[in-house]
Amino acid sequence: MGAAVVGALMAGTLITIETLNGAPANPLAASARALNLPTSGTEHLAPPAQPSAPEVDLAGAVSQAEQAGARDGFNLSVAVGDAATGDVAPGSNPDETFYTASLAKLFVAVDMLQRQRDGELTLGDRDLRLLHAALTVSSDPAMNALWTQYDGPSAITRVSRSVGLEDTTAPDDTSQWGEVQTSARDMVKLLRHIQVDLPAPDRDLLLGTMSQAQRIAGDGFDQGFGFLDGTHVPVKQGWLCCLGSRANLHSVAVLDGRFLVAVLTDEPPGYDAARQVVDAAASSVRRDLGDAARAG
């Protein structure tokens, strides 16, 4: 089964933080707004971006989200990071891995921009159009083209090494980009890398594009679940069915310019129940983090 076939099975979009006040008019333009970057079951992820930022109970928010989304027969993993303090709460099963489905598109996008900064390649208008399609309507044909042209399997390995990911691996069948393996913890680390480590033009391009994610994907799939709820936060969704008689539904995002969140699932085939699980976990996280931030 080739990449194009796997692509037909999945799509994904992630909402992050950059366009809280609406998407930029030019989908390829860097956002003009600067990000205000400002925790246990909590690990230290990186030096704090804002040493004076009040700490938030990340582990409590993760625990509540896991309880909210708990359902028999489902594997649910939730992780939350705080860009301000540099902490991450990896959840009760931090090493559990999932097929990425369309979350793999973020890894390839990060690698392409890194290679351009290193002088290995120059991205043209066509490349940017493909990136935009991959991150907004989660176009699988766009990802197929980028995966082939820009050495997708090695891109996964390069990003995993450079960002310090612990659980992310390229697929055994290198044509199947949806079979990249990752964890909720690693997705939080990748989001932090995008938000905090990238130079402003690359950061704003990715987050600004992610914030334009459309409810209806390029293949007609309704990706309005989890953090893709009309608020225009930067987000990426993923879905895949059915490997090993299981399905996957994921939502990752950056909230309030500060919190890096990932909700990943593995479940029996069918998406209706999975949407309920992801929605419940995402709503719980968003509520708890919002309340804590306001209290701080």
Image: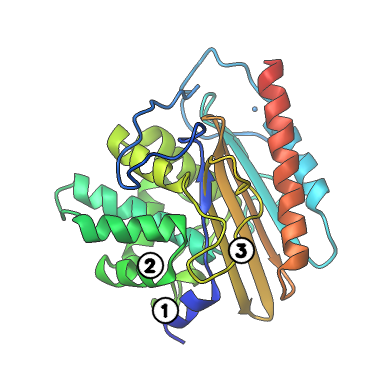
| Quadrant of the image containing the C terminus | top right
Q: Position of residue 5 (x, y in %)?
A: 47, 82
Mark 3 or mark 2, which is nearer to you? 3
Q: Residues within 10 Å of mark 1 (few under 14, many from 20)?
A: many
Residue 129 quadrant: bottom left
- Per the image, label 1 sits on a secondary structure element best described as helix
Residue 81 quadrant: top right
List the residue tagged with mark 1: 3
- Per the image, label 3 sits on a secondary structure element best described as loop
Specify the color scheme.
Answer: rainbow
Query: Which tag, 1 or 2, sits closer to the chain's start?
Result: 1
Measured along the vertical axis of the image, is residue 191 above or below residue 223?
above
The CA distance from mark 1 to mark 2 is: 9 Å
Amino acid of disc 3? Asp
Mark 3 or mark 1, which is nearer to you? 3
Circles 1 and 2: CB atoms closer than 8 Å: yes
List the residue tagged with mark 3: 222
Amino acid of disc 1? Ala
The CA distance from mark 3 to mark 2 is: 18 Å
Circles 3 and 1: CB atoms closer than 8 Å: no
Q: Position of residue 66 (x, y in %)?
A: 77, 48
For this rendering, which residue is in front, 231 or 14? 231
List the residue tagged with mark 2: 143
Q: Is residue 216 left or right of residue 198?
A: right
The CA distance from mark 3 to mark 1 is: 21 Å
Of all residues, the one furthest to the front in this rendering is 25
